[in-house]
Amino acid sequence: MTPAVWGGFLGAVAGGGVLLVAARVRAVRRPQLAVRVLPYVRDLPQVGRSPELRVVSTSPTSAAAGVFGPLLRSAADAVERVLGGATSVQRRLQRAGLDKTVHEFRVEQVLWGVVGFALAAAWGVLRMLTAPGSAATSVLLCVIAFVVGVLARDTHLTSQVRSRERRILAEFPTVAELLALAVAAGEGPVAALDRVVRRSGGELSADLGRVLAEIRTGEPVAGAFDAMAAATGLPLLARFAQGVAVAVERGTPLADVLHAQAADVREAGRRELIETAARKEVFMMVPVVFLVLPITVLFTLLPFEARRR
């Protein structure tokens, strides 16, 4: 076969592959019935919803999972068997506010590992073209890059959890004061919660919105707040939810409880700011001790050396 025929054949194969990928991505991104019905059942809680009724995400990760589904699923299962800790991952996903399953997170880990593997493989190919060496070293480097990519996604999830919890702590005093004002004005706990959720936005408001949705579907107020306290990883937020639950059950003045909770959070934030300033003060001494002080001593000794000469 001539080079022209080979070129035409390879071009046809590549074009067919691109068409297949485009068709599959279009099928994955097609709106489903659940997506069209979701705006009318937005207040219903996600807990207990079967995987078939979950809304399919339109992110690139879901598109890639749809195209390379079987391979990615098997790789995600292998990562799950090696790493384990599905309960911990599920809890961190909830704390990060991510509407994903553990399997979807494992698929993302595999994709991050594939990206690391591809970068290491590209670097190894360039290195072998410029300075031929051992292929085993390049293969080992690619495997290490894959593992680092998988672990990097897990570390990024932890950072997402911490970032979201910092935003919740920043919002908490304001939301607690708004709830206290609404309750003091004569509204009930559910009505006050509904007013605050509709008037505010943020991570804490989203959590309170889920609590409100559970209450509207028949869950007792105390039980919904107890579930919130069990799900959160912040001791201050857990105490707030438990305090509201106890106040509702026993008839304790809810406004006083909310004001006290907001004051506790502000005091905790003040203590954390003082501790952070103390740590930064130690780091600020590093350039003074290792840069400014040696230069000062050097300029002090130079005139004596010049006079001695």
Image (cartoon, grey):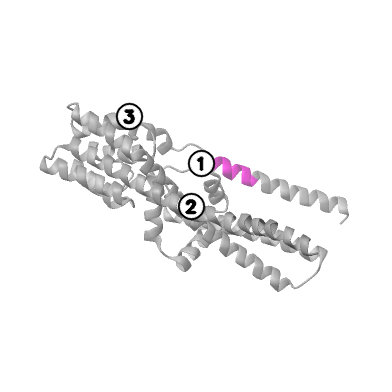
Q: Amino acid at mark 3?
A: Arg
Q: Position of residue 213 (x, y in %)?
A: 28, 38
Range of residues picked out in magenta: 20-27
- Looking at the figure, which quarter contains the C terminus? bottom right
Q: Which residue is mark 3?
A: 198
Q: Which residue is mark 1?
A: 58
Question: Which residue is farthest top?
Answer: 185
Question: Which residue is farthest front?
Answer: 307
- Looking at the image, do the residues carrying marks 1 and 3 touch, with CB atoms under 8 Å apart? no
Q: Nearer the viewer, residue 295 or 263?
A: 295
**Label 1, label 2: how many angstroms apart (C-alpha)?**
47 Å
Q: Amino acid at mark 2?
A: Glu
Does the image show residue 124? yes
Q: Secondary structure at mark 3?
A: helix
The image quarter in which residue 206 lies: top left
Q: Secondary structure at mark 2?
A: helix
Disc on the earlier residue, 2 or 3:
3
Residue 132 left/right relative to 290:
right
Residue 266 left/right relative to 27:
left
**Label 2, label 3: how many angstroms apart (C-alpha)?**
42 Å
Disc on the earlier residue, 1 or 3:
1
**Label 1, label 3: how many angstroms apart (C-alpha)?**
27 Å
Q: Which residue is mark 2?
A: 281
Q: Residues within 10 Å of mark 3 (few under 14, many from 20)?
A: few
Q: Determine if the magenta segment contains residue 286.
A: no
